[in-house]
Amino acid sequence: MKGLLRRPRVQAILGWMVAGYLRLILRTVRWRHVNLQSVEPMLAGEGGALVLLWHGRIPVSLALAPHLRRRPERRVLISPSSDGEFLAQALARCGFPAIRMSSAKKGDAAKARAAVAGFRESLKLVGDGGVLVITPDGPRGPNEVIAPGALQIARRAQAPVYLAGIAAAPALTLNTWDQVMMARPFGRGAVVWVGPLLAPEQADEAQMAALGAQWSAALSAATRQAEALVGSVPAGPRPGAAGT
């Protein structure tokens, strides 16, 4: 099955289908944004920024598009894996080109070089005034736990960070490590914004770990608030589950 998914034609078809679904949910769901005024200075300004949302909310992530499209340059961080390829194609079709990056396993020199290149590209984008969207618990979890890589980008970029808790109802919650939320058309949706936040430039390892726990809790709380606003309660385990 994995071999089939790696075929370029299959990836292109999946990308086209996912892009169609993302657009359908954006256009047919009645979206409500909470605390959007805190994001307005970034949307109206020229400086770079980061936007974080949980990996399981990628299928409803285009709810952010009408606002983030006000910025001329916006990208999304996506794993370079074959599973991430069709998603990268789908988001590019929707106006959010990808930067391909994920953490590398110890001893894998090729992936380490790719991770460094992606990190540098991310910093350049934000430094040049672009907006970078990150799912900081992806691509394999643990669920709703911000990984060190996203924190390091925030610390090095010294740009404002915004958290986006997203939910929709009615929706199907898949039995995956990240509890993927698949919204149905013509329902209700909510985005709860938190920020701006800033990672201290001189923070040490312990301080960054504490910051990660703090931001993870805040993003999860915003996501739970969005769920409450639309009456959606996903089934199964929440934070901490890891992919395989």
Image (cartoon, grey):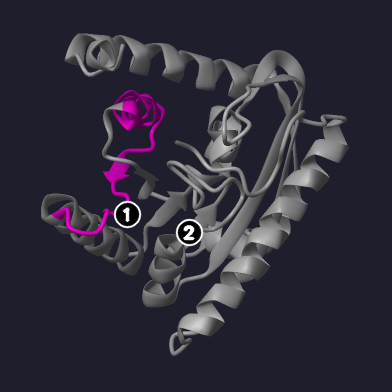
Task: Check residue 107 for magenta coloring.
Answer: yes
Closer-to-camera residue (214/240):
240
Q: Name the side, left or right, on which 3 lies relative to 227.
A: left
Coordinates of residue 86 in the picture (x, y in percent): 33, 23
Alpha carbon distance from label 2 to label 1: 9 Å
Local secondary structure at mark 2: loop
Q: Quadrant of residue 81?
A: top left
Label 1 is placed on what type of residue?
Ser
Task: Using the rendered image of the protein, determine whether residue 46 is visible from the camera's viewpoint.
Answer: no
Asked if the residue at tag 1 contacts the one at tag 2, i.e. Cβ–Cβ closer than 8 Å, the answer is yes
Residue to which mark 2 is pinned: 147
| Vertical relation: 123 (above or below) 70 | below
Q: Name the side, left or right, on which 225 lies relative to 201.
A: right
Residue to which mark 1 is pinned: 103
| Vertical relation: 19 (above or below) 31 | above
Q: Name the side, left or right, on which 44 lies relative to 4.
A: right
Q: Quadrant of the C terminus?
A: top left
| Residue count near mark 2 (Cα–Cα under 10 Å), binned few <14, some 14–19, many ≥20 | many
Local secondary structure at mark 1: loop
| Vertical relation: 197 (above or below) 66 | below
| Vertical relation: 111 (above or below) 244 | below
Residues in magenta?
Answer: 83-108
Q: Name the residue at 18% across, 50% down.
A: 111
Task: Using the rendered image of the protein, determine whether residue 71 is visible from the camera's viewpoint.
Answer: yes
Label 2 is placed on what type of residue?
Ala
Q: Name the side, left or right, on which 180 lies relative to 136.
A: right
